Amino acid sequence: MVAIPDEFQDLFEKETLAHVATMLPNDLPHVTPVWIDYDHERDHVVFNTARGRRKERNIQANPAVGVSMCDPENPYRYCSAWGEVVETTEEGAVEHIDELARRYMDVEEYPYKDADETRVIVRIEAEDVVTGE
């Protein structure tokens, strides 16, 4: 397991969009923009999605992922990580998407909640991290 370097952890406190790459059943990459988070205690890169979405189904079949993000204030400053999804959980996922909505949208609750949708937190353990400025 590799931690995100301290000097790049600020990317997880801004409105930084990340792109998560998962593998489709036909072995082609599927890349999706996501709101991104970091669990400092467990050194996990974290994002939130809905159960049954393409990326969530891809992860269930193949936990290998890549994540890349650029600093919204300096696109030449970046952080990329790849590794495996070590956990997907519904526990705390609604609260987590609300927390992300506060950061990214400056609203108290995620405004696009669907009553038929189940939110999940996806935790990634990085095997390697590359950064640049």
Image (cartoon, grey):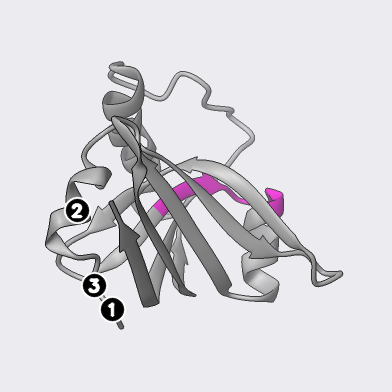
Task: Report which quarter residue 126 is drawn in.
Answer: bottom left
Nearest the viewer among 83 and 100 is: 83
Q: Please give the residue where the numbered disc 1 appears in the rendered image.
A: 2
Cα–Cα gap, marks 1 and 2:
13 Å
* Image quarter hosting the N terminus: bottom left
Q: What label does residue 35 carry, if any?
A: none
Q: Please give the residue where the numbered disc 3 appears in the rendered image.
A: 3
Q: Which residues are magenta?
A: 47-54
Determine whether the residue tagged by mark 1 lies in a helix, strand or loop: loop
Q: Residue at x 49, y 42 (%)?
A: 34
Task: Kindly indicate whether the residue at mark 1 contacts the one at mark 3 (C-beta within 8 angstroms).
Answer: yes
Q: Amino acid at mark 2?
A: Gln
Q: Amino acid at mark 3?
A: Ala
**Does the segment drawn in magenta span residue 2?**
no
Task: Report which quarter residue 14 is drawn in.
Answer: top left
Q: Residue at x 62, y 67 (%)?
A: 59
Cα–Cα gap, marks 2 and 3:
10 Å
Determine whether the residue tagged by mark 2 lies in a helix, strand or loop: helix
Q: Is residue 7 left or right of residue 46?
A: left
Q: Please give the residue where the numbered disc 2 appears in the rendered image.
A: 9
Determine whether the residue tagged by mark 3 lies in a helix, strand or loop: loop
